[in-house]
Image (spheres, coloured by chain):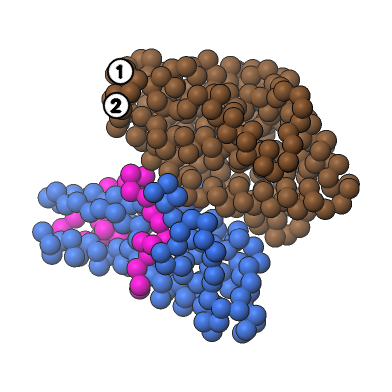
Chain colours: A blue, B brown
Amino acid sequence: MQEQLDEIQAVLKTVDDPELPSVSVFDLGMVHDVKVIGGSVFITMTPTFAGCPALDFIQRDVKKAVEELEWVTDCEVQFSFQQKWSTDAITDEGKHQLKKHGVAPPPEDFQPGQKWTVNCPYCESNYTSMDNVFGPTACRSILYCQACKNPFEAMKPVVDYMS
Amino acid sequence: MERGEEKVITSAEQAKQDPTYLQALKELLYQLADDDFLVSFRGSEWLGLAPHIEEDVAFSSITQNTMGHALLFYQLLEELGEGKVDVLAHDRKPSERKNAIYLEKKNGEGHYTEEPYYDWALTVVRNYFYETFKKIKLEAITKSSYQPLANVAGKVLMEQPYHLAHWKLWFEQLYNSTDDARARLQTRIAEAWEEFGDVLELGPYATEMAHFELMISEVELRDRWLEEIELMLGTLPSRTLGKKYGSGREGEHTSDLDQAIEIFQDVYVSDEGAVW
């Protein structure tokens, strides 16, 4: 059983978010639960942003990748809101990959209402300015590094506001 | 089910056991879904027309995400057996729609493709007022007796602060800039004061919603909203909030909704079986 779960996890680390190439859905912390019953796999995922148009693609890509495992007969992928995704769910590998892609990872242990400071993903400087809280996708913002003069993006902190 | 028992309904199947509960729940969901859907449709009509390029990016991002929120509420309705989300969004008659009338109002004179003389002051006032209200409503819903809805409200509230902050910033900056900007906002605030009434209403099942602890009361909702708006404006308009064109919660609407439906239905009816 553990072996099967490990195999699935390895596969999930290869399925990238279509809008963040090189960052896997696993490292984004979107995989909530994996269940195996015989040859059937049931995966529960937590969506990042509600309005994210990539969710359908992610669902399709995950299903396809898992079904390529020899012993898997079918894979069902569901999104659930019971567990809420927050930017804290992103793994260290995910953060590393985001930076390589020119996207500053979200701050750690961010509390709602706190000041959000972002270091440049290229030169690490904190001498940065916000150009637009809203970027090319719902989860990203557009910033500028005054030190190395590069524009860059950052993942918005999204945290559970009610808890 | 008696009030105060803190009964939690965890699934659509369970909600269907009590017809009165189900009716009140569906009513609330239609209001939430239709409000977000219409306000984001009007937002989408600004694409390419916003005051500057960064605003175009920001506003379209907010609009897309708000449309995503509408989808979540329509999905909850689908689970309750109300039909497919695409049909719920695109293929319901105006009289079946529960969005507040103020939210269907056209962006201004003209048409999206020809001479769009849209009014930014209306957009700033409408979105600031609406997002303020949405936050209050969703906060109340996180304690809703219908667990799947409470979960969705919690999720939406993680994203919505960015939307509210955006419109608050526009509102504050314009309100405190030139006399012209302030006067334009004031005209739209006066207009909103005559029309915003039904946004704050919960419709014919308001009592049941409170009874089943799906939602707080209309009075509480309204008071909280007025309190927030007063903080921003300093003093509230002296007249009482009106609902000039009736109540969208009761299925009453204006020709502006017909115009909106005609446009957003266009692609849908051209090929209803299309897969996106």
Q: Do the residues labelled 1 and 2 touch (CB within 8 Å)?
A: yes
Give the residue type that dot 1 points to.
Met
Q: Where is residue B203 in the image (x, y as percent from the top left)?
A: 55, 19
Q: Position of residue A86 (x, y in %)?
A: 40, 56
Disc 1 chain ID: B
- Residue for badge 2: B7
Is the residue marked by circle 1 packed among few (<14), some (14-19), or many (20+) residues within 10 Å? few
Give the residue type that dot 2 points to.
Lys
Residue at 76 percent of width and 58 percent of height: B52
Q: In this view, does B10 lie to the left or right of B152?
A: left
Q: Which of A75 and B209 is in front in this view?
A: B209
Element type at marker 2?
loop
* Quarter of image, res B35: top right
Q: Which of B171 and A152 is in front in this view?
A: B171
Q: Is residue B22 above or below residue B183?
A: above
Element type at marker 1?
loop
Q: Nearer the viewer, residue A93 or B214?
A: B214
Q: Position of residue A108 (x, y in %)?
A: 42, 67
Question: Which label number is shown at residue B1?
Answer: 1
Q: In this view, does B178 lie to the left or right of A42?
A: right
Residue range corresponding to the magenta coloring: A65-93
Q: Is residue B259 left or right of residue B146?
A: right
